[in-house]
Amino acid sequence: QYARLVQIVGQHDLGVGITLGAHQSIGFKGLLLYGTPEQRKKYLPRLATGEWVAAFCLTEPSSGSDAASIRTRAIPSPCGTFYTLEGTKIWISNGGLAELFTVFAKTPMRDEATGESRDKITAFIVERGFGGVTHGPPEKKLGIRASNTTSVHFDGVRVPAENVLGPPGGGFKVAMNILNNGRFGMAAAMAGTMRGLISAAVSHATDRTQFGAKIHQYGAIQEKLARMALLQYVTESMAYMISANMDRGDPDFQIEAAISKIFGSEAAWEVADECIQVMGGMGFMREPGVERVLRDLRIFRIFEGTNDILRLFVALQGFQTLGVQLRGVQAALKNPLGNVGVLTGEVTRRLRRYRG
């Protein structure tokens, strides 16, 4: 249902889609994934009705893709009942609207083995009403201008210990799982955006006459429209495949979500560019609104994991799977008579690969 809703919104305005996604897809997703029954009972009703808006606070001036380098700190009180939160987050979607923030901060953790204190990331649920939470002015952006993006400042915010989200020191995993869960929604939004762009291109092509014929009759235009439809169909299919797997409770969709985000964001950019090309000079004008869509789309190759970092993630995950397979073969070689099936399977796979 969320994928369908995001696709509809994405067809009309990605800025509005970001407001929705920042709230539901990542803003309070941590509560759904890691929240205690008490936390969910306290916060989810107001978040579900829209009475409260949520925001996801990870990025800082010194950390973007390198989430582990954040400097925001949360120091536990001597009595252990609260943490004091200090730091600044930047480029936060819904930063000026949110009443609830999922915040990531470094906390001192005692190493059980050595007894030494080490900083680890912990996730917190922070209410604006705790005091000490302020935000900067809205950022002036290239696109998605309908969304609210600000810095958020935490100055001596006292966060109750019961508002720790997930295990103390486990915040990095919490953040990554939230982002992994959120990426499939971006593919759905891109599918909706591409649907709107294709509609605009087709409408223009069937109405515009050049050299005595409607331009949709020319092969070059038909090829562009076919390519646009292909990219939209693949992106939409990926989004709904992943959402169906998530609905079934399949926990292993991180690679698929990353691939869908990479492919969808780059496909949508190509479709927007080709839409302008089909529309010619009219597409370059502000009135049809395609230039706004092009500006809106640029951010999707950057946030929630840059496409460059996600490509690295996909590759490393692939190598990891291969590494597990090769370790199994290596172990089988130590006892070949007892592992004939493993070795035969590996030989068969290699023969198939060599034969093409």
Image (spheres, rainbow, N blue to C red):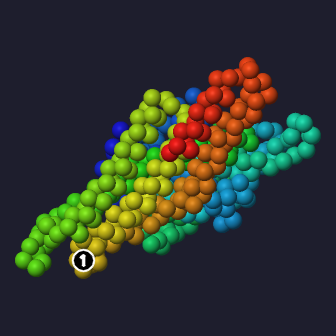
Secondary structure under tag 1 reads: loop
In this rendering, position of residue 317 left or right of residue 293: right
Q: Write the residue at 34% across / 70% down.
A: 273
- The residue closer to the viewer here, 151 or 52, is 151
Quadrant in which residue 298 is drawn: bottom left
Asked which quadrant contains residue 14, the reply is bottom left
Residue at (49, 68) in percent of width and height = 138
Residue 152, visible in the rendered structure = no
Residue 351 appears left or right of 116: left
Image quarter in which the N terminus is found: top left
Q: Nearer the viewer, residue 224 or 193?
A: 224
Taking the image as shown, residue 88 lies to the left or right of residue 274, namely: right
214 versus 115 height, above or below: below
Q: Is residue 140 above or below residue 18?
A: below
Q: Position of residue 195 (x, y in %)?
A: 28, 55
Q: Quadrant of residue 231?
A: bottom left
Direction left: furthest residue: 212
Place of residue 29 in the rendered image (x, y in percent of width and height, measured from the top left): 52, 42
Counting from the top left corner in percent of width and height, residue 106 is at 74, 51
Q: Three-letter amino acid code at disc 1? A: Gly
Q: Residue at x 46, y 42 (%)?
A: 47
Other residues around mark 1 within 10 Å, as few (<14) / some (14–19) / many (≥20): few
The reply to whether residue 312 is in sight is yes
Q: How many numbered discs?
A: 1
Residue wearing tag 1? 280
Q: Residue 167: x and y, percent? A: 70, 36
Q: Residue at x 46, y 46 (%)?
A: 184
